[in-house]
Amino acid sequence: MSRVQFPDGFRIEPLRRDHPRKSFRSGQVEVDAWLTTKAFQNQEKRLSVTRVLVNEDTRLAGFYTLATGEVDFSDLPPEVIHKLPRRRLPVAILAWLGVDASFQGQGLGQRLLAQSLRDAYEAGRTFAFIAIILDCVNDQAKAFYQKYDFRELPGHANRLFLGAQQLEVLMEVRSSPEGET
Ligand SMILES: CC(C)(COP(=O)(O)OP(=O)(O)OC[C@H]1O[C@@H](n2cnc3c(N)ncnc32)[C@H](O)[C@@H]1OP(=O)(O)O)[C@@H](O)C(=O)NCCC(=O)NCCS
């Protein structure tokens, strides 16, 4: 997963005030409400960062939102907390992700997920975190993320995580010629 390739004509941009977000419809009301009413304001307040996927006509095909957070040591599974201090621990949060219904089923969702993981991985080289966490809006969303190695946090049926070490493996740092510079 070195570089995320989107189909020709699509590009990723940081969310701007002038992006046509009001017409975005993923089919999930909470996801659409986030993008149309809160994402930009939260970005302005430095609470989260949203990046959008736009096509040649500047139509908004998809987006994801990343933020930082903390989880308690006791919420994490044994293989993740190995050797970690017993306190609240930093995590990256994949807060939201969605693809407009008219663009679904073309592989854009998985590419947006890959791009969000790459962003998180790159940020993690400067600001460390121990896992990426996300909350699923429903079972379909959960099934989508579980296809890509996210696992349930014990005791939190709708909260999934991907450990930082797994993220590193996904990003192929160990096999990349650049390695960890
Ligand atoms: C979930 C979502 C992002 C998937 O986007 P997409 O562009 O249609 O997904 P892709 O075309 O990249 O599909 C990637 C893979 O996931 C599978 N997939 C897609 N939607 C899925 C779903 N809802 N449940 C389970 N698997 C799903 C596809 O079958 C495909 O698998 P394959 O490669 O084995 O064929 C999109 O349906 C969406 O925006 N849903 C509403 C909002 C939402 O639930 N967001 C997630 C929570 S914030």
Image (cartoon, grey):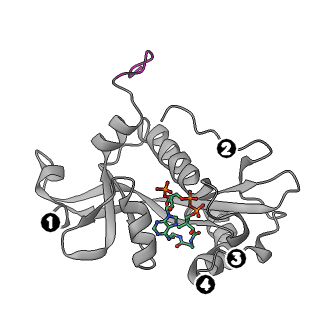
Residue type beneath disc 4: Val
- Asked if one can make out residue 69 in the rendered structure from this viewpoint, the answer is no
Q: Nearer the viewer, residue 156 or 104?
A: 104
Residue at which label 3 appears: 25
* Residue ranking furthest to the right: 57
Residue type beneath disc 2: Phe
Q: Residues within 10 Å of mark 1 (few under 14, many from 20)?
A: few
Q: CA distance from mark 3 to mark 2?
A: 20 Å
| Residue plotted at (57% across, 49% down) | 111
Q: Say if the magenta span includes residue 143.
A: no
- Asked if one can make out residue 109 in the rendered structure from this viewpoint, the answer is yes
Q: Nearer the viewer, mark 1 or mark 2?
A: 2
Question: Mark 1 or mark 2, which has the lower sequence index?
Answer: 2
Residue at which label 2 appears: 6
Disc 3 and disc 2 in contact, CB within 8 angstroms: no
Q: Nearer the viewer, residue 166 or 144?
A: 144
Q: CA distance from mark 3 to mark 4?
A: 8 Å
Q: Nearer the viewer, mark 3 or mark 1?
A: 3
Q: CA distance from mark 1 to mark 4?
A: 32 Å
Q: Residues within 10 Å of mark 4 (few under 14, many from 20)?
A: few
Q: Is residue 32 above or below residue 160?
A: below
| Mark 4, secondary structure of its residue | helix
Question: Mark 1 or mark 4, which has the lower sequence index?
Answer: 4
Q: CA distance from mark 3 to mark 1?
A: 37 Å
Question: Mark 3 or mark 2, which has the lower sequence index?
Answer: 2
Residue at which label 4 appears: 29
* Residue ranking furthest to the bottom: 29
Percent coordinates x, y for residue 45 in the rendering: 62, 65
Q: Residues within 10 Å of mark 3 (few under 14, many from 20)?
A: many
- What range of the chain is rendered magenta? 175-181
Residue at which label 1 appears: 74
Disc 3 and disc 1 in contact, CB within 8 angstroms: no
